Image (tube, rainbow, N blue to C red):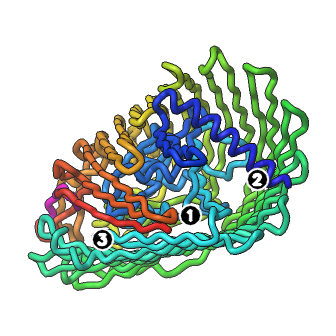
Amino acid sequence: MPRVSLLLLCLTLTLSVVAQVALQNDTTIEAYRDVEEVQVKGKLLTPAMNQVSSSSFSLNVKELQALPKLMGQTDPLYFLQTLAGVQVNNEAQGGIFIQGCDNAHTMLTLNDAPVFYPSHVLNLFSAFNASHIDRINVVMSAHTAADANRLGGAVTMITPIRAASPFNFSANVGLLCSDIHLRSHCSEKSDLFFSGRASYFSIYKGLLKTDGIQPDYNFQDFNFTYAYHPTNKDDIVFSAFAGNDRLTADHTTADLRLFDVSWQNLASSLYWDRREGETNFHTAVFLSGYHNRFLFDLQKELNLNGRSSIGSAGVKHSTDIRLSNRMSLKAGAEYTATRYAPLTFAVHGDFAFNVTSMPKTLLYAHEASVFTDFTHQVNTLFRYSVGARATIYNGNSRTFFQFDPRANFSLQVASGHFLYLHAGTYSQNNHSINLISTGLPTDFYIPADADFKPEYALSASIGYKGAFLRDKYIVSAEVYFKQLYNAVECSVSLLDLLYNNAVYTDFIYAGTGQNYGLDVTLQKVKGKFSGYLTYSLGWAKRFIPEVSDKPFDSSHSRRHQLVATGSYHFNTSWSVGAVFTLATGTPYTKPEAAYLLNGRVVARMGAYNGEHLPLTHRLDLSANYTLHLKNNQSLDFNLSLYNVYCHKNVQFITYSPQHFRIRQTGLLSMIIPSLSIRFSM
């Protein structure tokens, strides 16, 4: 009975909202006159992005279907990069960089399980099947104590746990990739979800050849979720994600394989949600892992073969208690054990000059945290939340204690207009090392220890969110500042590593940093046309004396970034979408000369990260048509154009092995069309 009552209440509220919104042209209404009744069908056009505050966003994955796709796939992380404060990546760099922080500073989870490398094909699109994701929650700076130990943002991907029908099947066939998705309401107490994807790039690899470079790529990924509901108070959910990728590139004129990179992901979790009156309990266990392997050939007489991995397992619990109508308390604990296999490599060839290979090393770390958050809605205008997170961490036989207080304040200054204030401290106990700045997935992880101490940050932000013109438009802005300590940087170059017997651990240094900037979003949320315009102005400065005697830009820093996203629904069948990005180039260290000295190759480098890649810009378009069939079946057709005006964005700098010349390299300089057909039943 409670379920029936709740369903009737939701249905009544939905029909009421539909009726009101229809008068404002925000709903498509079709009426059919029968002999005995009138049927009313409505479709509420909800925005793809919902702004919770100036620092928090929620993405409706279903509504992203109207926006451009690559290889016929809706990419959740691609649209994360359209948000203000999230760095726009190029086609050769994966990861989520939030407000000047490194990719490893972002906690990305799928149903409580951390995901270490979330990208397929160098971030052309992510490793997550959008058909398997219900919603994505993003927090930029205003974290609570319940958020895990990271310096940057938090991205939470949540899968559905209840299917709408006994059986639902959809299959998508694209030019470069296909997928299937199953949803089944197995019984009153169980639901099952499965998604699988695979690519067939190889049959088109000739079309991707550019500048004498022939890439080849293939991947597979799988998602599985099973939800069991023993009572109306309990949800027990198991989910698993696994992905496998391999990318190669051959230099056809030099008969040389430039690189061969493969990587694998695993993220699985089992959680139990229980509701007891005004109290909610959440308990989860998880297991995650990441492994990469890479081979680089600079010339036939010289190659580098390396690999690394990381794996973690843990348990977490939280209790959320509603103390009164205006006060709530959330408290919990978390434990994680992590095994690190940092970079191990071997160098072969006549020109290796007796380079010593790096042997395999296993390192272990343990991290335990307790946290509490208290929230008080003082009155209709003012709300605050205060909390703290305490952590004991042991890495490589060194123990650290951390205490991170945090506070968030919200003030309604007028109807529909809010001011936000956040302050807090953050700690992070694992380091990500970017050895080769080509954007390839060759990063590896090391634990914080006596040599590389835990990173921590002091963070503050001030934000505003306001609604205008009958709530059709929402404007938000946030000014943020982060002071970083023990920020790590690896300054060894590939030439040093290969030719001069360098040990990469001798070139990892720690120092201070500052991230600061302004993020602005203008969003249209009602009507047949919806979309948003974002602008980010940011600095990500680092000061590490061993690397440079002057402050330098972080390797992922972008000073300016502008993104325009929009979709227009003509009716229930036709829609079009567009995404335009414009961003300044990321920094790099320019080699100025190379010469032989005592039988060794010596490279003279310029100022560290003293140069910037050219401006990045790209336009993507899409058109969508839905053919409605009988019995709730449908055919969805999508035509997307990636890089419409064929602009060649420079992704990284490569070095000529014959003459030590540098060249600006872009993987994609042509328009990439994709056509997909999805059948749903």
Name the quadrant containing residue 378.
top right
Marks 2/1: CA distance? 21 Å
Instruction: List the residue tagged with mark 1.
Output: 115
Q: Nearer the viewer, residue 347 or 28?
A: 28
Question: Mark 3 packing: few (<14 Cα in 10 Å), some, or many (20+)?
Answer: many
SS type, badge 2: strand
* Residue drawn at (21%, 71%) of the image: 598
* Residue drawn at (25%, 54%) of the image: 641
Instruction: List the residue tagged with mark 2.
Output: 391
Amino acid type at mark 1? Val
Per the rendered image, the range of residues in magenta is 660-668
* Residue drawn at (31%, 74%) of the image: 217
Residue 183 in the figure: left or right of residue 187: left
Marks 1/3: CA distance? 25 Å
Amino acid type at mark 2? Thr
Q: Nearer the viewer, residue 525 or 666?
A: 525
Whether residue 492 is visible here, answered yes or no, is no
Q: Mark 1 or mark 3: which comes first in sequence? A: 1
In the rendered view, tell whether residue 80 sits above or below residue 122.
above
Amino acid type at mark 3? Leu
Whether residue 190 is visible here, answered yes or no, is yes
In the rendered view, tell whether residue 251 sits above or below residue 24.
below
Instruction: List the residue tagged with mark 3.
Output: 176
Residue 184 in the figure: left or right of residue 229: left
* Residue drawn at (41%, 43%) of the image: 82
In the rendered view, tell whether residue 291 sits above or below residue 405.
below
Marks 2/3: CA distance? 46 Å
